Amino acid sequence: MSVSYLDAINAALNEEMRRDPSVFIIGEDVGVMGGAFGVTKGLYEEFGPDRVIDSPLAEGIIVSSSIGAAMAGMRPVPEIQFVDFITPAMDAITQQAAKLRYRSAGAQTCPLTLRVCYGGGTGGGMYHSQTNTTWFAHEPGLIVVAPATPTDAKGMLKASIRQDDPVIYFEHKKLYRLPAIKEDVPESADFLSDLFHCAVRRPGKDATIVTYGFMLQPSLQAAEKIAEETGASIEVIDLRVLNPLDHETIPNSIAKTGRLCIVQEDHRTLGIGSEIAATAAELAFDCLDAPILRVAAPDVPAIPAAEPLEQFYMPDLPKIMTAMRQLLQY
Amino acid sequence: MSVSYLDAINAALNEEMRRDPSVFIIGEDVGVMGGAFGVTKGLYEEFGPDRVIDSPLAEGIIVSSSIGAAMAGMRPVPEIQFVDFITPAMDAITQQAAKLRYRSAGAQTCPLTLRVCYGGGTGGGMYHSQTNTTWFAHEPGLIVVAPATPTDAKGMLKASIRQDDPVIYFEHKKLYRLPAIKEDVPESADFLSDLFHCAVRRPGKDATIVTYGFMLQPSLQAAEKIAEETGASIEVIDLRVLNPLDHETIPNSIAKTGRLCIVQEDHRTLGIGSEIAATAAELAFDCLDAPILRVAAPDVPAIPAAEPLEQFYMPDLPKIMTAMRQLLQY
Amino acid sequence: MATKVKEPAAPAAAPKSAANGRPNSENPLISDDKLKQIYSTMVKCRLLEERARTLKKQARFKGNYYAAVGQEAVAVGAGIDLRPEDTVAPSHRDFILNFIKGVPLEIMFSQLYGRVTSPDKGRSSPAHCGYAPLNIITPASTIAAQLNIGTGVALANQMKKNDNVVVALSGEGSTSLGFWHEALNFAGVRNLPIVYICQNNLWAESVSVKLQTRVDDISLKATGYGFPGITVDGNDAVAMYRVAQEAIARARSGGGPTLIEAKTYRWYGHSEIDPAKYRSAEEVEEWKAKDPNAAMERYLTGKKLFSAEWKQQIFDSFNKELDAAVEYAEKQPQAQPIECLDHLYSFDVRGRELDRKTCTPQY
Amino acid sequence: MATKVKEPAAPAAAPKSAANGRPNSENPLISDDKLKQIYSTMVKCRLLEERARTLKKQARFKGNYYAAVGQEAVAVGAGIDLRPEDTVAPSHRDFILNFIKGVPLEIMFSQLYGRVTSPDKGRSSPAHCGYAPLNIITPASTIAAQLNIGTGVALANQMKKNDNVVVALSGEGSTSLGFWHEALNFAGVRNLPIVYICQNNLWAESVSVKLQTRVDDISLKATGYGFPGITVDGNDAVAMYRVAQEAIARARSGGGPTLIEAKTYRWYGHSEIDPAKYRSAEEVEEWKAKDPNAAMERYLTGKKLFSAEWKQQIFDSFNKELDAAVEYAEKQPQAQPIECLDHLYSFDVRGRELDRKTCTPQY
Ligand SMILES: Cc1ncc(C[n+]2csc(CCOP(=O)(O)OP(=O)(O)O)c2C)c(N)n1
Ligand SMILES: Cc1ncc(C[n+]2csc(CCOP(=O)(O)OP(=O)(O)O)c2C)c(N)n1
Ligand SMILES: [Mg+2]
Ligand SMILES: [Mg+2]
């Protein structure tokens, strides 16, 4: 049965809550309404108001109370409705969750999974479209994942909930109901996905694209189109995990292809692409035959609402095509 | 007269407050006590409690009230006592200050200068040693500077206060009273330093070190030592500005030297070095003769307090020497 | 009495809303003209928002819209007498404050349509309208953030020793955020010239106020900040006007901040895409019966200040103004794509973004 | 009466501290043994901290230390009857809570010395001591953050339907932070089993409480959260004990949270490097005259529960314990440098950090 990204997340939550009574959900509008996007639909009805908590409007306490609950043996799955509103939880995430195990030398831990809705291209404007993965990819102690497919959405969420570390789980709002990515998803209650490696989504030998989240879609399309146009074969790698980064798959791919382009929805400066490029320039330097390119949003504060401005901002298929032609011709 | 980094900051504040009545200071302990490190000493006495405001213990309102005041025509110079405690101001800095001009299409602006004390190596432990420059270097709309010398400390602070954009001014606590860097500092009330370019602190032709803040010290020592040991000449570039980055000086240097090493106090992943390496791998690829190396702290959540652990953590002269030898031998 | 100033030392239970939605406060100091102005402004606000909603439903503009229909008395009572130099810090639901403060309708509809003639040239969301010439802060979406910026404006006004005030609006949901607390605490400590207006409409998106805070009256929270907290029937325009003006006058004369809780209700969903299934039809009906505009109409009728012709006249002329504003906005162009790169800093960055320079080796 | 429960509806002015520092509350329900235990624990806390201060002055350990000397009654009154399963969320100034809750002195001094035998193996600052086996949260330095984590522990306890409580401590400076507000508001909404103890020692580093908040009594702030706020003379151990136990019992039995404001004073600087020039010598003397330990001594004397020999005995035996603990700690090694890489995740990262693998091209 073909399952959407959103339904995959919902199923993962449901299965884990059935399996383990210590799993609970907390966030704004997650209960009665079933979430701003309907991701938690039905869970309030099944598990009740004590396990699906409609919280006060305060991202700080959503995350910090989850940390305390996790420390005390629960497995909270807090939600941030839009990553644009994650700043009130910045201390909780970076100074508490990320550092608790370290500062207590392993004696105190917080196995929580923070679900965060992110991503642009929906006309949502400056405060409903942000990416903001860098803040957390930069924080050792956090595991940061960003699934791009329904199967990963399910398997990685279930694995995250079972993982004994704080996980930030980024889900892209444009993927929620995207028909193109619907797929069969393993139904086993113990289906888990790997939380530590990239996935090669399309093998190739002439150049490597590294991307994640929604951008996997135009990247795969670009690879297809390039193949048709020029016969060149592009390897497309889905990052999947933003922290800690998989430092083997990508250099290995470059060892084969010699060319690297990173496609990210975030703006250029200090997006995840910076780290991937830096690592490649260190660990795969001898393999590189061309400059490392990045297709990224321009360095502006956030995505403007008006369509022409948003289009200028968003990385997309034409922009990836331009970069890939340049990369292959080098 | 030889002036310390701390005295240079103090003089800049004093001069700008005398010059412009709209300049005021706000922060924890900045008034009666003259700051946790004495940086604002004497200003409360000279300018009184309305221009040197001892705020409540709330970094959020320290910055957000400054934004409002700046919007209304003032030139606030708020202070964050330790960058480790900047998280409560994360929304104010990244979602308000950085985006106000953009979201109002230039109609509303906030010329504020946020002074932030940062840096490790003093035994301060996990919460008094952080760097955290990445969060802000990643935010378009902010200017982020990090002076490494008394002259820059003064000239860049004065220029920041006069700049019509929000500036985050990172001052390193280990530089405050460091005798080795004391120097003559221009006394003119209108001495300002450039806010947009790197400075070549030591010219060279065999390799380039890019660094900033306290790390300029061991980097210069390493260059000296390498010259003595091998005769190789190392160009040392002081970044000075972390956002928006100077994308000319560094590639130009690499065009000459062919080798790049970045030295940063921050941990490796997504520290500013990632962006510098990524930019070099894009814009100066043909010039590179060796992998780009980074001397950085390991990816752990923060600097542990105990000496052996702190030493393992901190980048220092021996670690830079190891990297430079490797780079030159490549 | 629908209102009662609560001094910190003795907060009391909130006054109940008037029965049958009739305004239950009288104030002989309010002139007949002012009463009529209040009413006509409320009517216009509703016409304006219903128009915006219709256009939204017709997909004539993109993005989202958060109607304050049902809450007009609060916005009008608080905003109607503000001076241009006074600052308004609006939330997502306070689009009409722009109109009340005097922003031309052409500009407001340009905002909805994201045209170059909008104050932000199409950057923010449709409902997030600010206007620098009249000191209306362009809101972020971040709940409560406008209160903190507004508090900073009040600090500047105090430093400059002028008598401008700030009116900062938000919903009851905002009171749970740390930002809210830091703003009010700071305003208390420094006795700032600011009025915080909490529009308690019982719901924050789908979340009941019962899950937002344990207290029945948000105004009680002022107790912890050392300045007056007042609960007022937010559907009673006269009461709202009186309480707001008292607080504004106090702020203007150096008397410090006030927290006003206006109990009210939004008739429609959180935004135009929200069917609001989380609340009962009875609740909605109950509150619609307390329609602030109808109540004000009855009040004016009782005072012989109302006629059906006058009302019709307001409708007709304002609808024409709306027609013209919509027509104007629809004719304006959107920004050029490249303008995405503008207004980032005080200096231009187009060159930097468009022209990335590659270095060649020097041997 | 030194204490008074303030129900949200009717907060009153705080009771004044007892004249001449004599404890002024009586409670026949407290046994003689308990009274003596309270006193002896207070004495030991002071000996412990004075020893820590001496060692710090002698530079026998690094980092900073924040003594709570002068505030012992608060910590002891709140902590002395806690069960191991109860959680303590301490601030930077609550090192002695570890002792009160039963952490061995060897471990506490290992913490000061940053040795491998410390609970955190030398990672945190000397004063930031936590201990998982006794449910003491290892504090960050971030002011108030422990309250929020503690609130989450209380949530978990409520979910698990056990009767464990959380005691979360902080200073009056913490009340200005948004974190503080979000924690208390949430605890109110969910009626969590937690007691917030605000140690109002008049100063937050150099900042007077007058600049921290406009209210005289921090306990008033509970009004906004819908649960009791109490101001107690924090230098009156008996009053403190009674009020804390009442709040703990209420929390344990499902009665929800309490905010206790304990008015007290720190005798020394903010930390050992702070000469505290921002406050007057008179103020310090005035408060030293209200020494909680001396007051308790007089109280016991009045009840014929005190003798100089007994006191000497406490001193002698505890000083020996301290000697042994210091000696123990000084003998322990520090962590190996490489251990910097440990306890980052539930999995090992040494290999990853130490062995960065370079790729070779494949042609
Ligand atoms: C910090 C933050 N968190 C979440 C949101 C998403 N959000 C937008 S409006 C809203 C509810 C606001 O409720 P309230 O403050 O009562 O205002 P109302 O909409 O009722 O006028 C939420 C949760 C946001 N904008 N900002
Ligand atoms: C969020 C944050 N801001 C600033 C600091 C620096 N700081 C440490 S203790 C302190 C004062 C605390 O005062 P109070 O809460 O009254 O506790 P006390 O020290 O009096 O016990 C400050 C400002 C910090 N640790 N955390
Ligand atoms: Mg509301
Ligand atoms: Mg204090």
Image (spheres, coloured by chain):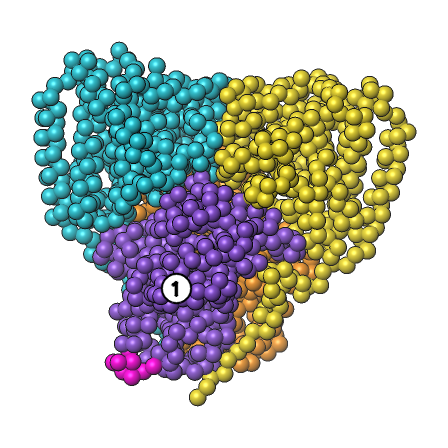
Chain colours: A orange, B purple, C yellow, D cyan
Q: Where are the magenta residues, as a range?
A: B226-233
Residue lying farthest right? C309
User: Is residue B23 something one can see in this rendering?
Assistant: yes
Q: Quadrant of residue D298?
A: top left
Rendering coords of residue B138 (x, y %):
49, 59
Is disc 1 placed on a helix, strand or loop? Answer: helix
When the figure is inspected, residue D228 is found, relative to residue C359, above or below; the finding is above
Query: Which residue bears the numbered disc 1?
Result: B150
Q: Residue at x 79, y 26 (%)?
A: C31
Q: Compared with residue C10, is residue A239 higher up or lower down, i.e. above or below? A: below
* Residue drawn at (33%, 70%) of the image: B219
Where in the figure is residue C181, as x and y percent of width and height?
50, 36
Q: Quadrant of the C terminus of chain B?
A: bottom left
Q: Quadrant of residue A325?
A: bottom right
Q: Position of residue C105 (x, y in %)?
A: 78, 46
Residue A129 placement, left or right of B208: right
Whole-percent x, y for residue A204 in the image: 50, 72
* Residue shown at the point (68%, 33%) measured from the top left: C78
Q: Nearer the viewer, residue D299 or C160?
A: C160
Q: Quadrant of ligand 2?
A: top left
| Amino acid carrying mark 1 in the image | Pro
Farthest top residue in view: D28
Q: Confirm whether the magenta stretch covers residue B229.
A: yes
Residue A254 shown left or right of residue B305 in the figure: right
Quarter of the figure that contains the N terminus of chain B: bottom left
Identify which residue, C261 or D137, lies in the foreground. Answer: C261
Give the mark count. 1
Q: Local crowd at mark 1 within 10 Å, few (<14), some, or many (≥20)?
A: many
Above/below status of C90 relative to C38: below
